[in-house]
Each structure stands twice: as structure tokens, then as C-alpha cells.
């Protein structure tokens, strides 16, 4: 638990703050790096995000650290590794009421706090109130309700870009399918290109929503007093993306703007995580950062040479509610992953399933069906097959992370060094798995849809 400050010390810290900016967060639902114009993507148009990057700081190595919706949002709120958050390390878990989160701390400090759209989700809020704050229909209604003598903290969680790709039809038709870059783990087929085009259209819908709210902020006269952050909660929902610790599952866009405090047009190439937003917002507001927070304020430009990654149970897609635990590290040159239960199916059981379907940790999409139609293929193995206990990718030579070199003698030293770093990180941050195997996350309550348990699907012969 966090060490509580005395009321006098808390008040003194607030008075010491030079000014208390408003906090405005824009959070996309499954928006992956580098899908924004400012990163060089030639297809998708993101004028709102590009504007924030021009007027503030663009981050080129931002990571969700946990590639699952509510766990990554828990990390953002608390500034802690998700393995420190108990059941909240898994989708449809519970974020304990006593866990400090920046929204509650800012509210205690006098901020007017609220959210619109998708807040902390999916899961069960222990205290019955969404950890993102009080729900509002929109940013405009939130501003109208805000007491004029209070700074505000607002969370806008879009439902885009999220499958099914049913928004932005006109945007989709404008895009040239031929210009879309297909990741190396997927077949270069028109079905895949059309699927990516649908995703891109919803990225543009999200960006448009943020642009409208930035205009609302300008009209309110609060622009120069507001720290704005725009990012995604994890990677995209294509196969080998969401719920995977490869870059397309964990690497996200991120831009921050704070007029007068963060210089315009800056670029930060160090490794950062969504968890860093928690101490960033608290420091900006002059609110003491709880001692349990392990993330670093972005106002201090952390210069990490790596980021640590992890996941536990995503959806309920394995017999016995089993998790698929992973721990890993991403450096400039390498991605090292440790699959702690390699006998389990990383994408979910191929036959036994609840409501999600076979390989249920991969959400339904035309791309999923296209790859599944060719079960004897490299793409199928990469997206749905079992994985070895260790994976190592040379990201300079293999940017799509498809060639596992963990067993090659030339990489033995690198693998050993990265493995030691992961083990040390697990111990230093109090990871329950540092002491050995545990069934804690297999037994953790799951509040998501279960449907009816059916008989295992029979293989087609």
C-alpha cells in the first residue's frame, strides 16, 4: 500500500506547485504504432495527433507493456507494472479500491474529474465507480458542469479503432489499398489489405473525435492551461497484435502538449510506457507521487534503454480458465520473450472455447479467417501455433519479428544477458512469478461473457 502523506504535507506540496494545469487524455482503443501521419505512415491521415506532435513532444518508443485492454489501462492509471496489481493484470479482472490511481489523487487535490466513452474497461470496478472518474456524455457536457474555480482532469476513451470496422466507410473508400504496407507475418492478399483499410478508417475516426475536442478546448479558453496526451491502450486487433508482446501488440503512438512547459516540435526517442502518464500527470499538478509507483514522469524525459513487457490471461479461451503468462524485454536491437507455460496455446485453445471462438485471444476479423483457411502455412504457425519457452528477435534485421533466433549460437550471449535482465526486473518489482510457477491468475475471477460451454469442436478431416 502507498505511504499516506499527512494532511499538512499534502497541502504544502499543492501550494508549492507553480500552477495546476488541466489534464486531458485521449485514448484510442487498439491503436498501434506507427499508424499516424507524423510517424511516416503514407495511408492514414491523423491531423489532430500530428498537430499535438508539432506543438508538443512526439514519443517514438512508447509501449503499453501489457497488450490487453483493462490491464494496460490499469497501468496507465496506477503507474505500476500490472503483475503488482493482482487480478487487474488480466482482462475482466478487478482493480482494487485501495490501489492509488492518478484520477482519485487529483480529485482529492481539488480537480474536477470525469470521462466519456470507454473508461477503465473491461472489468469490475471494486468500488462501483469507474476508476477513470464520473461518466459524462461528452467533453462539452463535462466542461459545462465543471466548477470554474477547479482545474479539470478528463479522460476520453474512444471505441475506435476496434473490430468490427463499421465506422468511417467514406474514409475507407478514399484510401488506396495498394499503398498499404502488410506486416511480414501476414500474407500479402487483398483480404488482408481490405481489413487493414477498415482499421485505418477507424484510426481516422478516432483522430477526428480528438480534433473536435481540441477545438472545444480552444473555444473554452483553456488551451494554454491544459496538458494534453494522446495515445492508444495497446496494439491493433489483427492476428499477432492485441494480446501479444510483439511490437504490433504493445508499441503505441504517443504525443504530449503542454504550452509553455513542453517545447514545441520535440521528439523523445527513449523508451516510455503508458504507466509513465500517471506520475507525469501528478507531477504536473504538484501532487505527490505515491511510493508504490514504479513508472517515471515524462516531464523528466526518462532515458531508458529498454522496456519490460508482460501479459497474463486475456480472454477466457482455454480449458480451465488458464492464463498464458509472458515476461520479456524490448531493447533497441532485440525483443526477448519468456513464455512461462509453452505447452498452452498462446492464441487460445483451437477446439475448446466459450463465446469467442477457436483461438479466441485473436479477435474475429477477415484476416483471422483468411489465415485460418491455410493451416499449413508460416502465417498460421506465427499467429496461432504454440511457441517455445524463449523467443528472441533481432529487430534491426527482422523488424516484423518473425524469425526466432533464440536457439542460434550467434545469439546465445545476447539471449543470456536479456534473460538475466528479465529475471532481475521480476524480482525487483515483486512479480509473484519470480518465485516460480503460480496458478493465481488461472484462479483469478473472470467477469467477462462466458456463454455456454460446448463440446470441443471436431477437426475437419
Image (cartoon, helix red, strand yellow):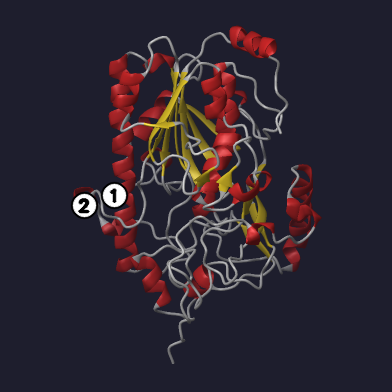
User: x, y (%) of residue 269?
Assistant: 56, 36
Contact check, label 1 and label 2, Cβ < 8 Å: yes
Q: Residue at x 53, y 73 (%)?
A: 349
Question: Dot 2 lies on which element?
Answer: helix
x%, y% of residue 16? 62, 8
> Mark 1 and mark 2: span between their CA atoms?
7 Å
Q: Quadrant of the N terminus?
A: top right
Mark with earlier residue (1, 2): 2
Horizontally, residue 124 falls left or right of residue 41, namely right
Residue 336 shows up from this direction: no
Q: x, y percentage for residue 195?
A: 32, 61
Quadrant for the C terminus in the image: bottom left
- Which residue is the site of mark 1? 201
Residue 431, given in percent of the width and then of the height, sits at 73, 49
Numbered circle sitting on residue 169: 2
Q: Is residue 442 left or right of residue 162?
A: right
Q: Quadrant of residue 274?
A: top right
Q: How many residues crowd mark 2 within 10 Å: few (<14), some (14–19), many (20+)?
A: some
Amino acid at each position: 500500500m502507498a505511504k499516506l502523506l499527512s494532511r499538512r504535507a499534502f497541502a504544502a506540496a499543492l501550494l508549492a506547485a507553480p500552477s495546476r494545469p488541466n489534464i486531458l487524455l485521449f485514448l484510442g482503443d487498439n491503436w498501434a504504432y506507427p499508424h499516424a501521419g507524423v510517424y511516416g505512415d503514407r495511408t492514414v491521415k491523423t491531423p489532430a495527433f500530428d498537430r499535438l506532435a508539432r506543438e508538443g513532444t512526439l514519443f517514438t518508443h512508447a509501449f503499453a507493456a501489457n497488450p490487453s485492454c483493462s490491464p494496460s489501462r490499469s497501468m496507465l492509471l496506477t503507474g505500476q507494472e500490472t503483475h503488482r496489481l493482482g487480478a487487474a493484470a488480466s482482462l475482466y479482472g478487478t482493480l482494487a479500491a485501495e490501489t492509488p490511481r492518478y484520477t482519485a489523487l487529483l480529485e482529492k487535490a481539488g480537480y474536477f474529474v470525469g470521462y466519456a466513452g470507454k473508461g477503465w474497461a473491461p472489468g469490475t470496478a471494486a468500488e462501483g465507480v469507474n476508476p477513470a472518474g464520473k461518466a459524462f456524455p461528452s467533453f462539452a457536457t463535462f466542461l459545462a458542469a465543471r466548477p470554474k474555480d477547479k482545474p479539470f482532469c478528463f479522460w476520453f476513451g474512444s471505441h475506435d479503432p476496434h473490430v468490427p470496422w463499421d465506422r468511417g466507410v467514406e474514409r475507407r473508400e478514399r484510401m488506396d489499398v495498394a499503398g498499404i504496407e502488410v506486416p511480414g507475418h501476414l500474407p500479402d492478399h487483398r483480404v488482408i489489405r481490405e481489413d487493414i483499410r477498415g482499421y485505418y478508417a477507424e484510426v481516422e475516426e478516432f483522430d477526428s473525435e480528438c480534433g473536435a475536442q481540441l477545438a472545444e478546448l480552444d473555444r473554452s479558453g483553456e488551451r494554454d492551461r491544459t496538458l494534453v496526451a494522446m495515445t492508444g491502450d495497446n496494439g491493433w486487433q489483427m492476428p499477432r497484435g492485441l494480446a501479444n508482446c510483439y511490437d504490433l501488440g504493445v508499441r503505441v503512438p504517443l504525443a504530449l502538449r503542454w504550452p509553455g512547459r513542453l517545447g514545441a516540435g520535440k521528439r523523445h526517442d527513449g523508451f516510455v510506457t503508458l504507466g509513465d502518464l500517471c506520475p507525469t500527470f501528478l507531477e504536473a499538478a504538484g501532487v505527490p507521487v505515491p511510493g508504490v509507483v514504479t513508472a517515471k514522469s515524462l516531464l523528466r524525459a526518462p532515458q531508458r534503454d529498454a522496456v519490460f513487457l508482460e501479459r497474463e490471461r486475456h480472454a477466457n479461451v482455454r480449458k480451465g480458465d488458464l492464463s498464458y503468462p509472458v515476461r520479456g524485454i524490448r531493447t533497441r536491437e532485440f525483443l526477448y520473450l519468456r513464455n512461462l507455460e509453452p505447452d498452452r496455446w498462446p492464441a487460445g485453445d483451437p477446439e475448446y472455447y466459450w463465446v469467442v471462438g477457436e483461438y479466441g485471444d485473436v479477435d474475429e476479423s477477415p484476416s483471422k479467417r483468411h489465415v485460418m483457411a491455410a493451416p499449413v502455412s508460416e502465417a498460421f504457425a506465427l499467429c496461432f501455433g504454440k511457441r517455445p519457452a524463449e523467443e528472441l528477435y533481432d529487430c534491426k534485421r527482422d523488424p516484423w519479428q518473425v524469425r526466432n533466433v533464440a536457439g542460434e549460437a550467434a545469439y546465445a550471449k545476447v539471449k543470456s544477458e536479456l534473460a538475466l535482465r528479465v529475471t532481475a526486473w521480476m524480482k525487483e518489482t515483486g512479480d509473484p512469478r519470480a518465485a516460480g510457477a503460480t496458478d493465481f491468475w488461472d484462479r483469478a475471477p473472470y467477469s467477462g461473457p462466458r456463454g455456454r460451454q460446448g463440446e470441443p469442436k471436431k477437426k475437419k478431416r
